[in-house]
Image: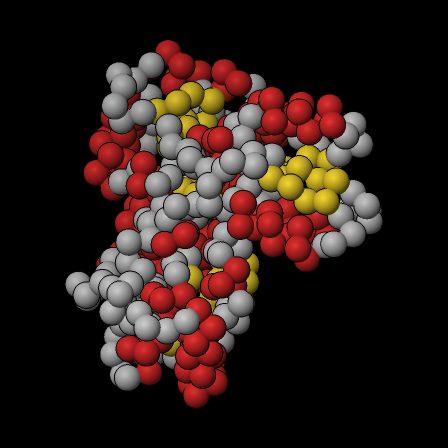
Amino acid sequence: MTLNLPMCDLNATGGDMSEEEMHQAIDAIKQRMGDDLIILGHHYQRDSIVQHADLLGDSFLLSRMASESKAENIVFCGVHFMAESADILSRDEQKVSLPNLRAGCSMADMANLEQVEDCWQQLIPGLGLSDPITRADQNAPAEESESYLVPVTYMNSSAELKSFVGAHGGIVCTSSNAAGILDWAFDKAGPNGKVLFFPDQHLGRNTGLAMGLQEDEMAIWSPDDFPDWDALKKSRIILWHGYCSVHRRFNTGQIEALREQDPEALVVVHPECTREVVDASDAVGSTEFIKRYVEEAPSGSRIGVGTEINMVKRLNDQHPGKEIECLDPMVCPCSTMYMIHPTYLLDVLQRIEAGEEANRIIVPEEIAENAKTALDRMLSIPV
């Protein structure tokens, strides 16, 4: 949720500045504001943003670290759902800003509240399941005779969907803890219950397969298609049809081509990639996992990486003794992450320093309360 504040105009701030002057201006504001300001940078941001970040990481790690800081002003160089999560987890006196309000997430946009509520209202009676909201203790395991539909939303989703999940006894997951979260959800659903997992089908499928589920125990739900009730009744996980446009570009042909060039090459990919790509890789994990995998690989390694190209190029620069390359050399940066430009960052910082609530992200209290419940449930699950 955002305030209706004016959008930064690329030509309005720093139009006559050189790139170096712009970076100097950003650094000067940071120095003047000191501990009252913290800038968060996601791994997928361009280098000209990362150089100004006080903290670099994935969305949930950054949100937690920001909430634990002394800073009153949090500037999140990422996309909209990340800034929402930071606002939900932050203290009341902290203010979260997004340098460019247009920076969204195509995957997160593939599931909205109206669509999920419609799905929920069809699945509960259609599959003969109960809504966990009817249970006195939504955190308690299901009894043998009980069967629930438990919602799980990926961190890459709107605050409204996190709130929906929290209200219906569900939970949030990240790419690093999805298996533990699904174990929790299965426990709450009961032996004949089911999990509704959204919005990314590939993370849900890859995690389910790694946990020992069979392909036919996972069915796809698309709001645009007529439900396949036979497949849904057989399933343990109902997967929303969403996907990441960047990670879907990677394919097994790219992996085969790399290994033809170098049979000793290693391959690590993000779990938002397709099942076929994950199966063909040496390792799969979150952005933090990929970062560690590259760091821990032996000197001289050649590593093909299936994730956003800004991060891959940065890893290659940071490890001169290793050859780190993107599996798809033609892949473009995440288009919405790329909307965060130093010009936008400078504009927001100038306005914050002047006392404005620049591009502030505010999640309404009635949404934030249940969303935080879902996030807190996640935090209670060991990774």
Residue 189 is left or right of residue 300, and the answer is left
The residue depicted at 75 percent of the width and 34 percent of the height is 265
**Residue 40 visible:** yes
In this view, the residue in front, 102 or 321, is: 321
Measured as percent of width and height from the top left, residue 182 is found at: 52, 37
In this view, the residue in front, 69 or 76, is: 76
The residue lying furthest to the right in this view is 299
The residue depicted at 28 percent of the width and 49 percent of the height is 160
Quarter residue 90 falls in: bottom left
The residue lying furthest to the top in this view is 230
Q: Is residue 380 above or below residue 236?
A: below
Residue 205 is left or right of residue 77, and the answer is right
Measured as percent of width and height from the top left, residue 113 is found at: 25, 41
Q: Is residue 286 above or below residue 240?
A: below
In this view, the residue in front, 146 or 74, is: 74
Q: In which quadrant of the rendered image does the N terminus lie?
A: bottom left
Residue 279 is left or right of residue 1, and the answer is right
**Residue 95 visible:** no
